[in-house]
Every structure is written in C-alpha cells, then in structure tokens.
C-alpha cells in the first residue's frame, strides 16, 4: 500500500517546502501542480499560455486541465510506493476526481495534512518570497542569498507574488479551497499542523502526524 500524502494549505503556508522535504526523506516523488504549470510556461508549452494568464491574475486553472495533468502524472510507475501531492486538489471537484482516481489505482487511502498559518503571516511571507528564475526553487526567506543555492540562477519575485495578486489568491483560497478541508475533515487520516512554527519544527510534527495516520490506516503495522 502506498504512502499517499496530500499537503494542503493556503499560499505561503510553506506546504511546497514541507512537501519537498518529506518526499525526499521518504524517497517519494513530490508532485507540485504549481511547479508543473510554471515549468510548462518556461518550456513555452502552448497549452500553458492560457494557464499562465490565469495564474498571473491569481485565479485557478480550470478543473478539467488540472485533473488531466494529475491523472497523467499518477499513471506513471514511480508513484507505486506513494507520492506527496502539493497544490492539488484546490476545489471540491478536484478532490472528488482524485478519490475516483485513487479507487481505480487501488493504492490505499489518502493521508491529508493541512498546514495552517494565520492570514497576516501569509501576506508577510509572500511579500518577501523570492524564487529562482531557472529552477524555480525557493530562496532563503531571510534574504541572505544573492543567487540560487541549488543552481546559481538569479532570484526574482514570482509573477503572482505581488500584493494585489496575493490578496486575490488568498480570496480564491477561502472561497474554492477551504471547502476541500471540510470534504476531508471527517476522515481518520486527516491532520492539521501549525505552519506558523519554524520550518524544522513543522517538519518534525508533520513527520510524526503522517506516521500516526499511516499506522492507524494500516491497523498496527506502521508505514510499509
Ligand atoms: P501557492 O504558492 O499559491 O500555493 P502554487 O505554486 O501551488 O501556488 O500555484 C500557483 C498557481 O498555479 C495557482 O495560483 C493557480 O493559478 C495554479 N494552480 C496550481 N495548482 C492548481 C490546481 N490544483 N487547480 C487550479 N489551479 C492551480
Ligand atoms: Zn535554481
């Protein structure tokens, strides 16, 4: 049975960072729909151009496009032992489609973690966030870096991190994505972690919560 983790949370919660870290610790693929879309835009993939316009306005890309992207990705063999999904599902329709997909893949239940952070902290974090223009990774938020630590690329503000777009993304989150938490909330494998703590601390709690959820899911067996 795969370790199938969904990292939920508002923009700026740090779910991408945590998803990447957990995935590499466990040797699982991290599937970030935001990264996949930005990569498609960098590659000048024609279907990505319409998506880019919506992303730059802080709006969601349509459900049919996103469900297709994720369905194709989850059809690849590297998700056999599980995956960490970041940025999907963002609507209840996407969450329903994912449940259907999981039934078809027959790889066990989802473990859903909500990385919760107060709104004023999100606005502050997004205002100072810088990402690499070449590889897309996040820079140190304290601003100490001149270039990307991973690849040496130049750092820049993400097109959708300017203040008006940030407020729109938070509004879209409240309206379209919060209901997804209610969709999952009653499941025995749903957890909430306090994302306002230091990143190491969040990672530590997250790890324990996912272990616990996996154990519960498997009966006594633990993660396997
Ligand atoms: P954030 O830092 O806001 O969590 P992401 O990198 O996850 O941002 O996503 C950036 C943008 O990509 C979103 O604002 C949205 O336009 C688009 N996007 C990513 N995932 C989805 C999705 N599952 N459904 C619709 N749009 C998406
Ligand atoms: Zn880089």
Image (cartoon, rainbow, N blue to C red):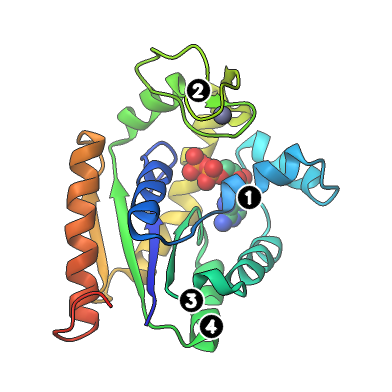
Q: Going 59% across and 31% down the picture, which residue do you hit?
A: 160
Q: Which residue is farthest left?
A: 220
Query: Which residue is under mark 3?
Result: 80
Gap in Å between the C-alphas at discs 1 and 3? 20 Å
Tell me residue 183's x, y (percent). 38, 70
Question: Depth-wise, is mark 3 or mark 2 nearer the camera?
Answer: 3
Question: Depth-wise, is mark 3 or mark 4 nearer the camera?
Answer: 3
Q: Going 23% across and 84% down the picture, which residue do you hit?
A: 218
In the displayed structure, 21 sits above or below 186; it is above
Disc 4 secondary structure class: helix
* Front in this rendered view, residue 106 or 87: 106
* Circles 3 and 2: CB atoms closer than 8 Å: no
Gap in Å between the C-alphas at discs 1 and 4? 22 Å
* Circles 1 and 2: CB atoms closer than 8 Å: no
Which circle's residue, 3 or 2, is located before the other in the chain? Answer: 3
Q: Which mark is residue 130?
A: 2
Task: Determine crowd level at label 2: few under 14, some 14-19, many 20+ residues with C-alpha closer than 10 A.
Answer: many
Query: Which residue is under mark 4?
Result: 100
Q: Going 58% across and 47% down the picture, which residue do you hit?
A: 34
* Front in this rendered view, residue 59 or 71: 71
Q: Going 60% across and 18% down the picture, which residue do you hit?
A: 154
9 sits to left or right of 153: left
């Amino acid at each position: 049975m795969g370790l199938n983790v969904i990292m939920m949370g508002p923009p700026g919660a740090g779910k991408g960072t945590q998803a990447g870290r957990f995935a590499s610790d466990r040797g699982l693929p991290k599937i970030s729909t935001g990264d996949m879309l930005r990569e498609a835009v960098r590659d000048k993939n024609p279907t990505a151009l319409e998506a880019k316009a919506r992303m730059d306005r802080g709006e969601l890309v349509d459900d049919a496009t996103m469900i297709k992207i994720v369905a194709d990705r989850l059809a690849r063999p590297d998700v056999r032992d599980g995956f960490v999904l970041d940025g999907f599902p963002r609507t209840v329709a996407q969450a329903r489609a994912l449940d259907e997909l999981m039934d078809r893949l027959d790889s066990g239940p989802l473990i859903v973690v909500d990385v919760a952070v107060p709104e004023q902290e999100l606005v502050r974090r997004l205002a100072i966030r810088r990402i690499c223009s070449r590889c897309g990774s996040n820079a140190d938020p304290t601003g100490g870096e001149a270039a990307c630590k991973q690849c040496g690329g130049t750092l820049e503000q993400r097109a959708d991190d300017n203040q008006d777009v940030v407020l729109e993304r938070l509004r879209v989150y409240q309206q379209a994505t919060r209901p997804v938490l209610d969709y999952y909330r009653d499941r025995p494998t749903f957890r909430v972690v306090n994302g306002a703590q230091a990143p190491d601390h969040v990672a530590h709690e997250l790890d324990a919560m996912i272990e616990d959820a996996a154990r519960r899911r498997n009966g006594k067996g633990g993660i396997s």
